[in-house]
Image: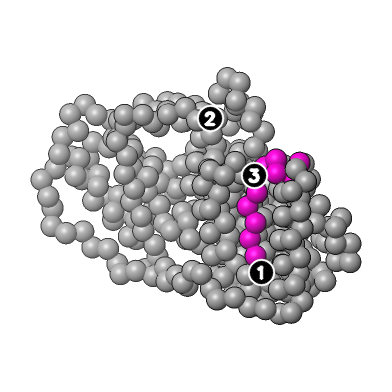
Amino acid sequence: MNITVLNGSPKGDLSVTLQYIRFIEKKFPMHKFNYINIAQRIGKIESDNELFDSIINDIKNSDLIFWGAPLYVCLVSSQYKRFIELIYERGAAEAFAGKYGAVITTSIHFFDHTAQNYLRGTIEDLNMNFAGGFSPDMYDIMKDENRETLILFAEAVFQNVEKKLKVSKTFKKLNYTMPKYTPALPVSASDPGGKRVLILSDREYSNDNMANMIDRFDKAFNGKTKKISISSVNISGGCLGCCECGMDNICVYGDKDDYMKFFNEEVKTADIIIFAGEIKDRYLSSKWKLFFDRAFFNTHMPTLKDKQGGFLYSSIF
């Protein structure tokens, strides 16, 4: 069968996750594997319509799609998330309908179930047939017994495709439409008492639910808030998973963009932080995912300890 591998790692061919699929290829040489480094090339894929169309054409000619991705902050990388958004934005979802999809995610077994659920939900939203999911530890492939488990997983996936077996959907199709939000009567405004209130959004909202929600919250603090769209911040790209920040909390991007400066000077100095954004494709936008991923330059330090936080969620109407 023809198998297309959508590689969700920014590391491309050096991805640990990809090695699991490469191992499957070696053990099942009767199948043809086509690898596409989605996350690593997302900038080119987004800007080059011909490249995007060629990827969609590969999907149309495939019997099975492997969605392979490492875990990035409880989900897939922002680059991979952006590709899923492009599928819908460019009307390419139909190419996936009826195809079989399997998921391999690697992690240290910390919230890997959320990435698995997200990708399975994506497969089901695209009207694909779910063929199986596998979530090993990053280094499981180094052990004989875990490689045997991987082979059994692959055998089951191929059998599902060859026999055209179908399983019931796990996640209900989502309806993202919602009524128009109309703020209630004014309430008495609060004085933040010297506390710095920061409202972060993924883009500038205007004349929609999120704009009204942000305005409503702003007025609740006598207008004494600071509003920033992260789309206005110079961010060169998504997290590369290089872990260079592990030594001294300095991102490999350095001063090539303004993310570290923005996070240190605006986010970390706020006392109250509100995260505002629309839900799309079962998550917030890829722009928000970019923000969360790049914050990993702080590694696992509790940089927002003792701060108050809240979320404003919306959808289209």
295, 213: nearer the viewer: 295
Please tell me whether residue 84 is drawn above or below residue 18 in the rendered image.
below
Does residue 140 show up magenta in the picture?
Answer: yes
Q: Secondary structure at mark 2?
A: loop
Work out which residue is located at the far right of the displayed protein and give it: 29
Disc marking residue 131: 1
Quarter location, residue 65: bottom right
The residue carrying mark 3 is: 137
The residue carrying mark 2 is: 299
- Camera sees residue 93: no
The residue under the point 76% across, 65% down is 155
The residue under the point 65% across, 56% down is 134
Work out which residue is located at the far top of the displayed protein and give it: 248
Disc 1 residue crowd, few under 14, some 14–19, many 20+, Cα 10 Å: many
Which amino acid type corresponds to the residue marked 2 in the rendered image?
Thr
- The answer to whether the residues at label 1 and label 2 have Cβ atoms under 8 Å apart is no
Which amino acid type corresponds to the residue marked 3 in the rendered image?
Asp
Work out which residue is located at the far front of the displayed protein and give it: 145
Q: Position of residue 15 (x, y in %)?
A: 73, 44
Please tell me whether residue 268 is drawn above or below residue 40 in the rendered image.
above
Left or right, 220 with respect to 298, comes to: left
Q: Which span of residues is magenta-colored?
A: 131-142
Q: Earlier in the sequence, mark 2 or mark 3?
A: 3
| 3D distance between C-alphas at marks 1 and 3 | 20 Å
Q: Position of residue 28 (x, y in %)?
A: 85, 62
Q: Position of residue 93 (x, y in %)?
A: 62, 71
Q: Position of residue 132 (x, y in %)?
A: 65, 65
- Camera sees residue 71: yes
**Where is the N terminus found, in terms of image quarters?**
bottom right
Indicate which label's residue lies in the foreground, 2 or 3: 3
| 3D distance between C-alphas at marks 2 and 3 | 19 Å
Q: Earlier in the sequence, mark 1 or mark 3?
A: 1
